[in-house]
Image (cartoon, rainbow, N blue to C red):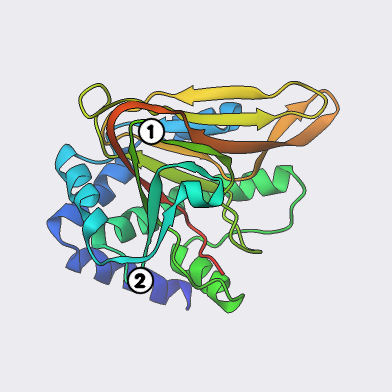
């Protein structure tokens, strides 16, 4: 697809987008991306405040019992923790698809800058559709956006969402429930394993509709002898009470 045809396609999609999706696109465009980029460089994660409205959060959460998923994972059966999640099937729900395609172009320049700093040759195209096509050509054709549900006592072990050769180095998790009202506990946790040093933990406090963007696998860190890579894992601490829903936006597809 040429640059001109991609631009035409984007204009066509924007013109046909329902008002809700157009509002999401405008919201994404209005986020302080320079600050988000700086925070990602410093910590490997950054909050995106009020990405979704409460009504949008409820709308996505209520999909959990709908027939829009390709698989259902009960974490305890696989040693992943406690809780469960479902991977959406194609075609993705409109709002989930819109988040994936509008967030990606904002994150691709950061991903490319990180790879250059770490001496990794892979570069990511401007449009998400082009990156998905790359994944599918390599046999990674299963969609990865997912909806997670936790109840009291549930937690998610530290992990990385790597599903094949092609991995986009950033992903987004959006909290759909309101802390203290819908649940207690259940904080998003990120750990960073630094060479020859003790690991560092980061907890990102979120409210309903807030998102956290974070490194999937590793990120560059400037040291005294140049840039080195640090390895990151993410998870969710134990839920003390209530129920917690999260939607995960992963940009690469799976085998």
Looking at the image, residue 171 lies above or below residue 134:
above
Which residue reaches farthest front? 77
**Could you tell which of marks 2 and 1 lies nearer the N-terminus?**
1
Q: Is residue 19 left or right of residue 105?
A: left
Q: Is residue 42 left or right of residue 59?
A: right
Give residue 152's mark: none
Crowd band around label 2 with a 10 angstrom C-alpha radius: few (<14), some (14–19), many (20+): some
Q: Position of residue 56 (x, y in %)?
A: 19, 46
Q: Is residue 199 left or right of residue 73?
A: right
Q: Quadrant of residue 226?
A: top right
Q: Quadrant of residue 234?
A: top right
Q: Position of residue 146 (x, y in %)?
A: 39, 54
Quarter the C terminus occupies = bottom right
Q: Is residue 118 left or right of residue 128?
A: right
Give the residue at mark 2.
Answer: 90
Quick one: 226 or 177, which is closer to the camera? 177
Q: Residue drawn 62% across and 75% down?
A: 138
Crowd band around label 1 with a 10 angstrom C-alpha radius: few (<14), some (14–19), many (20+): few
C-alpha separation, residue under disc 2 versus residue under disc 1: 31 Å
Give residue 32's mark: 1
Q: Residue drawn 59% across and 23% down?
A: 201
Quick one: 43 or 226, which is closer to the camera? 43
Q: Residue drawn 25% across and 71% down?
A: 12
Per the image, label 1 sits on a secondary structure element best described as: loop
Q: Residue drawn 57% across and 33% down?
A: 44
Q: Position of residue 144 (x, y in %)?
A: 45, 60
Looking at the image, residue 152 lies above or below residue 145:
above
């Amino acid at each position: 697809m040429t640059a001109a045809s991609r631009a035409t396609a984007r204009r066509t999609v924007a013109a046909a987008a329902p008002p809700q999706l157009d509002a999401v696109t405008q919201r994404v465009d209005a986020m302080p991306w320079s600050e988000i980029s700086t925070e990602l460089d410093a910590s490997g994660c950054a909050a995106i405040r009020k990405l979704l409205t409460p009504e949008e959060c409820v709308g996505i959460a209520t999909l959990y019992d709908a027939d829009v998923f390709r698989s259902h994972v009960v974490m305890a059966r696989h040693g992943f923790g406690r809780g469960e999640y479902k991977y959406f099937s194609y075609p993705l729900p409109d709002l989930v698809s819109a988040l994936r395609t509008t967030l990606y172009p904002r994150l691709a320049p950061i991903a490319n800058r990180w790879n250059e700093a770490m001496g990794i040759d892979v570069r990511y195209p401007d449009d998400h559709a082009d990156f998905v096509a790359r994944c599918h050509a390599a046999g990674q054709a299963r969609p990865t956006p997912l909806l997670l549900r936790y109840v009291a006592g549930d937690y998610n072990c530290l992990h990385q969402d790597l599903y094949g050769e092609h991995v986009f180095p950033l992903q987004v998790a959006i909290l759909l429930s309101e802390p203290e009202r819908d649940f207690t506990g259940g904080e998003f946790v990120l750990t960073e394993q630094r060479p020859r040093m003790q690991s560092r933990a980061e907890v990102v406090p979120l409210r309903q509709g807030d998102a956290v963007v974070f490194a999937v696998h590793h990120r560059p860190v400037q040291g005294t002898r140049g840039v080195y890579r640090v390895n990151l894992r993410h998870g969710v601490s134990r839920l003390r009470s209530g129920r917690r829903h999260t939607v995960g936006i992963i940009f690469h597809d799976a085998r």
